[in-house]
Image (cartoon, grey):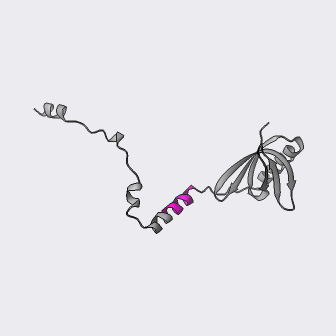
Amino acid sequence: MNDKFYESEQILDLSKAQDRGSKKWVAMMLPEHVALLREYSKEIKREPKPDLDEWDYDAIHHTLDIAIKSKADTKVKMWRDGAFIYNRGIVESIDLRSRVMELEDPFSLLQLKLDEIVDVTIMD
């Protein structure tokens, strides 16, 4: 008799149920709490700034020197406000006094701060 009971019983498959996550709790929260939770979420996603040593700066300088002389397609990795930003183009000039590099991409001429650069790669 027990076997028939188990055969006729429908087994619920909970893997197809979709939870609304935090949406169901937002209606019960104050706007200040929602703002703090969003700010906390942004803080968690922040990338730490890489610690560059003398060897890293020397490698960046050497790669930039080759890129500007050969007018090669170059990828520049920058760290700004907790996130990595990638730009790609041809290095036009470097101004050491104002610590700015000009990079020409297909759409515009970008001015990048040298202090934000963490890696440079020649793509050619």
Most foreground residue, 113 or 20: 20
- In this view, the residue farthest toward the front is 107
Q: Find out whether residue 83 is within the magenta segment.
A: no
| Residue at point 17%, 32% (across, down) | 8
Quadrant occupied by the C terminus: top right
| 114 relative to 105, above or below | below
Q: Give whichever of 57, 95 is nearer the camera.
A: 95
User: Residue 46 placed where, x, y %?
Assistant: 59, 57
Residue nearest the viewer, comparing 56 with 14: 14
Relative image position of residue 79 (x, y in whole percent): 69, 55
Residue extending furthest toward the left: 1
Q: Is residue 110 above or below residue 10?
A: below
Which one is in front, 28 or 118? 28
The part of the image, by quadrant, that contains residue 1 is top left
Name the side, left or right, on which 43 lies relative to 62: left
Q: Residue at x 39, y 61 (%)?
A: 27
Percent x, y of residue 86:
70, 48
Main secondary structure found in the magenta portion: helix
Q: Position of residue 96 (x, y in %)?
A: 86, 59
Query: Residue at position x 42%, y 67% from top?
Result: 30
Q: Quadrant of residue 71?
A: top right
User: What segment carries the magenta color?
Assistant: 37-45
